[in-house]
Image: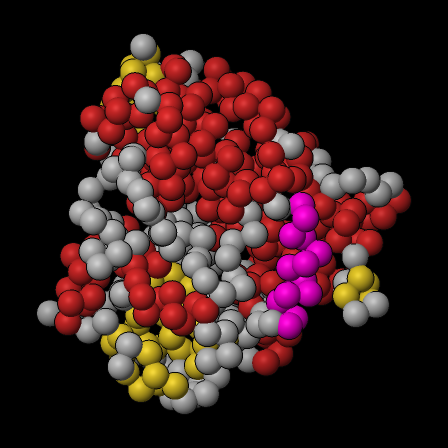
Amino acid sequence: MAVDLTDLDLWVEGVPYAEFARLRREAPVAWFDEPPPNSGFWSVHRYDDIVTASRDVAAFSSARGVSFEEPTDEDMAARRTIIDTDPPEHTKLRKIMTGTFSQRAVAVYQHFVEGLTDEVLTAGLADEPFDFVDAVAKEIPIRVLARIMGLPQARLGQFIDLGDRLIANTDPELTDVVWGRDDTDAYRRFPFRSPYGKQLWDLGREIVRGRLRAPGEDLLSKLLLARVDGDALSEVDLDNLFSILVIAGNETTRIAMAHAVLAFCQYPGEWDRLRADDGLLDTATEEVLRWSCPTHFMRRTAAADTDLGGTSIRAGDKVVLWYVSGNRDDAEFADPEMFDVGRSPNRHLSFGRGGPHLCLGAHVARLEIRILLAALSRRVARFELAGPARRIRSNFTNGLKELPVRAVRG
């Protein structure tokens, strides 16, 4: 019997990898019905088809949103972010920030990230057992992001809290307004269809007002000075760029870090292998990203009648690209169910692949994960689970709410 991939309670128990394997074999591009008001979607499971759709932005548009939701034109106009745009608009917005997130620009932060990571680990590893999510994974990415964007250190707790409530807007443990359960119509024009989206906007506007009085060299200052076709970014553009940078720049790396330690609890031999050979740090970082797949899917909308994987798709149909399935496709990856810190090549989909929507923060994430793995390898002989990992109720993010572990020194 087919598994309902929209059943969020299913995902609390774990990613349905076995179902995705069946779908890759039997129904690589499959139609799934949805209850009203949604209209159903095409579900894409194979690596090659996901890459094809990602590259063909003329046929598979991002302009109707990237989730299962079917917003109105007015809703989209109010909360459209850079990930909800197609070229040339997407290209213009991306160009403003490309310099900040280039590999060369990100390398400048290496010393800062190394010092921050050592500081966080010194405090976080002091207790036994401890929650790796709370003590380590949530601390590093937000502080790196604060340095890049120019966010005030005193407000970082608010950013973490709002980001949690937004990215996990389907989990009643993390938000009191649950998408899919509660009536969220009043919030439909805020990020993630949530009242906390407005709170993040308001916090961003407060910080922006301060930056207007005293601009610096940070990313927020660059956004305020930027011009697109000769015009400054509108308040709506600034609201939405601010919110997506705060959420995406923090949550995805945090998820990957937590899943890295969970993987090393489950595959202690791979931890021994990495500790014995720091030449594996780069390949280990990529394997952590493939394995964790922080964002399970991105949705596109067919801009015209088209074909994907031999399946006819009509204009206006939703098309869901399951990165989490593509990352386990044995047509691309040898032994994909094995966690292998030496895997090469590793053309995973966790940052997207092909087309214009490659994750802007990919180089930052890689830097943070690599430095964390290196620092942990100097301090920890092995990781042991001290309780069950608790997952966020979501089929969009692969987030962990809690990861209780013991870090055996060595």
Residue 25 picture quarter = bottom left
Residue 370 picture quarter = top left
Residue 30 picture quarter = bottom left
Is residue 48 depicted above or below 250 in this figure?
below
Quadrant (top left, top right, bottom left, bottom right) of the C terminus: top left
Question: Is 272 within the magenta?
Answer: no
Quadrant (top left, top right, bottom left, bottom right) of the N terminus: bottom left
Residue at 65 percent of width and 71 percent of height:
89
Residue in front for this viewpoint, 260 or 363: 363
Q: Residue furthest left?
A: 1
- Asked whether, in this view, residue 371 is left or right of residue 15, the answer is right
Give the residues in magenta: 88-100
Is residue 390 depicted above or below 121 in this figure?
below
Main SS of the magenta segment? helix
- Asked whether, in this view, residue 59 is left or right of residue 398, the answer is right
Residue in front for this viewpoint, 33 or 42: 42
